[in-house]
């Protein structure tokens, strides 16, 4: 991920470690996160929130340096305007309505009354909270609290959005809206950093992933690149077709194929190959020569779930 | 401090005054502030029910002054102390308990400016409640013991302003101490008791140790010294020219320590 990235346009971790007393938070992290949607993936305790707290200045690294678009996180005057953070903490200052919270904190940012009011309205509208915003936060549902936190992270129009489990508590409709919003922000060239332990969600929205395990970065990059570099685990491709048996008898003609078996449950042939590109080319010929009607061809384990399982879970088959 | 810092301090003030005066944590502040008034009305009630009016030794304007001198020691040494403990120790500690400190830390505000804004808001809250309570007590006592016209006479009001001034300075000094204690320590009760003991025993301390206390300087600013008697040993007048700069310097140094400390604070609510 870091080779092509200009450091003033990236979030850079240089040999960063964080210890809580003797407990490891993250260890020796080297990262350069480019614009777009980047997902931090890992189970609870893997270091996702620690990384986010480090890049937003809520924590200080025990060693190493961090730069967010060239700004040190311990410089709040320069960091605050460019970073918005939707934390996992489900807590708010007491007694405020959603609107008062946003407006109040925009004033602390230094916006005048008119600008703060306009930005408050805009942020509330973006997360669909205009109507309930005059009610006290204490009476909000979990989904509403999540959305008001999102509004607070967005309100000052930051270039970097850090979102810790942002889809938690949202209903399917709201999830779709919020994901569309993330895509929109990423398309504008912003950095959108998301943590999630729901891997299929990550697959849907990420441009790149950072896989974490027990405080270590175990892989980073686009899902496809990470997956293709795992030579120990041949890529699985599912070919849904009318005659999988006929296809199976021919696919071994391709050198890179190491295994093929009929998957009755999914109605197709599951092929394991060490070179997906060569296999796809050869598959065209085989299909044409044998008159097989192909319904769909898709990687079966080129998702975060499988990649994470291979890297962390000992490499069991995802079939 | 530049224009942005001033705008940010105003922003913090708005939020903190709202919390300090209308929030859930404001109730104990009002109850503590009411204590001197309750004591005053209790005194009036008892003297009306038991006797036929004010006791002879407290008769007239002179008696009112005498009564209020004792009353003010209660305000200074207990009400102001406990009130400031509650308000200022909770300034940051309360936010950590509520898990809401990160909202401030995510804004582009220098941490020292945040300390200044929160401290100013807390001082305003404390001054309004305890200064108001002191003024009301003073007027009620003088109205009861010296008559309504006496309570509003210019010389009596001049003394009142001095008493309120001492309260405001008390909030300044105690506030700074408890703000910094709340930033350094997790448990607040033990340090509050230790400081209370230190302040209470101030009179008996050697001269150089006396100066390391808020009450030492405040006593020097009280307009009317206590007469001979049990209260008198508590007060050991110090020149206004030492007391006023002393308390301001003490406050400034303590706030510098708070500013240094806040720069190193991390958000790790789980550890609390």
Image: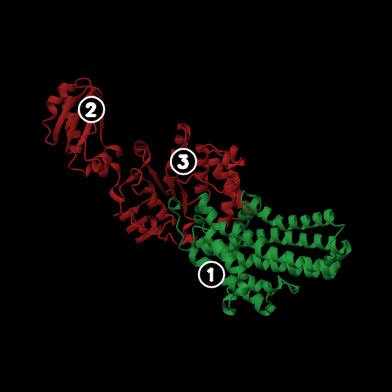
Calculate the distance from the C-alpha at mark 1 to the C-alpha at mark 3. Answer: 44 Å
* Residue in front for this viewpoint, B199 or A122: B199
Q: Locate residue B50: give its quadrant.
A: bottom right
Horizontal relation, residue A138 to residue A59: left or right: right
Residue B256's tag is 1
Please identify which colour was used for chain A in the image.
Answer: red
* Residue topped by disc 2: A239
First-in-chain label (3 vs 2): 3
Q: How is the model colour-coded? A: by chain
* Mark 2 secondary-structure assignment: strand
- In the rendered image, residue A71, in percent from the top left (x then y), is placed at 42, 60
* Viewer-nearest residue: A279 or A194: A194
Q: State the residue at coordinates (11%, 30%).
A: A252
Q: Quadrant of the N terminus of chain B?
A: bottom right
Q: Are marks 2 and 1 on the same chain?
A: no
User: Which residue lies under the disc numbered 3?
Assistant: A181
Number of residues whose C-alpha sits closer than 10 Å to that of mark 3, classed few (under 14), some (14–19) or many (20 or more): some
Q: Is residue A150 above or below residue B88?
A: above
* Image position of B76 (left or right of B5): right
């Amino acid at each position: 991920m870091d080779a092509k990235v200009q450091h003033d346009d990236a979030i850079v971790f240089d040999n960063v470690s964080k210890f809580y007393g003797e407990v490891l938070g993250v260890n020796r992290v080297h990262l350069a996160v480019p614009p777009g949607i980047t997902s931090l993936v890992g189970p609870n305790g893997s270091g996702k929130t620690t990384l986010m707290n480090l890049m937003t200045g809520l924590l200080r690294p025990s060693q190493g340096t961090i730069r967010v678009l060239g700004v040190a996180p311990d410089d709040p005057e320069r960091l605050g305007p460019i970073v918005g953070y939707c934390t996992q903490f489900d807590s708010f200052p007491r007694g405020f309505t959603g609107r008062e919270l946003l407006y109040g904190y925009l004033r602390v940012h230094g916006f005048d009354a008119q600008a703060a009011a306009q930005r408050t309205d805009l942020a509330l509208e973006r997360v669909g909270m205009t109507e309930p915003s005059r009610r006290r936060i204490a009476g909000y549902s979990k989904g509403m609290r999540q959305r008001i936190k999102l509004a607070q992270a967005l309100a000052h129009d930051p270039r970097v959005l850090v979102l810790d489990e942002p889809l938690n508590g949202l209903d399917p409709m709201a999830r779709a809206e919020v994901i569309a919003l993330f895509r929109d922000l990423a398309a504008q060239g912003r950095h959108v950093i998301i943590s999630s332990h729901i891997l299929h969600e990550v697959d849907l929205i990420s441009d790149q992933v950072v896989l974490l395990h027990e405080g270590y970065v175990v892989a980073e990059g686009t899902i496809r690149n990470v997956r293709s570099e795992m030579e120990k685990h041949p890529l699985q491709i599912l070919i849904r077709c009318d005659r999988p048996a006929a296809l199976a008898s021919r696919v071994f003609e391709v050198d890179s194929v190491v295994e093929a078996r009929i998957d009755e449950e999914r109605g197709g042939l599951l092929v394991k190959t060490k070179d997906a590109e060569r296999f796809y080319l050869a598959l065209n010929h085989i299909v044409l020569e044998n008159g097989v009607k192909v319904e769909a061809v898709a990687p079966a384990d080129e998702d975060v779930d499988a990649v994470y399982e291979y890297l962390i879970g000992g490499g069991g088959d995802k079939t | 401090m530049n224009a942005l810092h001033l705008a940010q301090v105003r922003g913090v003030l708005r939020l903190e005054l709202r919390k300090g005066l209308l929030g859930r944590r404001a109730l104990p502040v009002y109850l503590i502030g009411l204590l001197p008034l309750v004591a005053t009305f209790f005194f009036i009630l008892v003297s009306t029910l038991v006797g036929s009016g004010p006791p002879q030794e407290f008769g007239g304007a002179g008696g009112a002054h005498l009564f209020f001198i004792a009353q003010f020691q209660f305000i200074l040494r207990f009400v102001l102390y406990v009130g400031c403990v509650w308000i200022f120790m909770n300034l940051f500690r309360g936010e950590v308990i509520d898990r809401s400190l990160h909202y401030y830390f995510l804004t582009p505000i220098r941490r020292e400016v945040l300390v200044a804004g929160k401290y100013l808001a807390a001082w305003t809250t404390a001054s309004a409640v305890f200064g108001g309570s002191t003024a009301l007590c003073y007027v009620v006592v003088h109205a009861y013991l010296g008559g309504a016209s006496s309570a509003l006479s210019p010389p009596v009001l001049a003394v009142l302003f001095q008493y309120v001034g001492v309260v405001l300075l008390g909030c300044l000094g105690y506030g700074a101490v408890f703000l910094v204690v709340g930033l350094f320590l997790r448990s607040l009760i033990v340090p509050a008791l230790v400081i209370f003991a230190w302040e209470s025993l101030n009179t008996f301390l050697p001269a150089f140790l006396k100066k390391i206390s808020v009450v030492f300087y405040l006593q020097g600013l009280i307009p009317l010294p206590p007469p001979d008697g049990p209260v008198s040993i508590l007060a050991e007048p110090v020149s206004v020219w030492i007391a006023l700069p002393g308390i301001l310097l003490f406050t400034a140094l303590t706030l510098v320590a708070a500013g240094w400390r806040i720069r190193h604070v991390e958000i790790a609510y789980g550890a609390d």
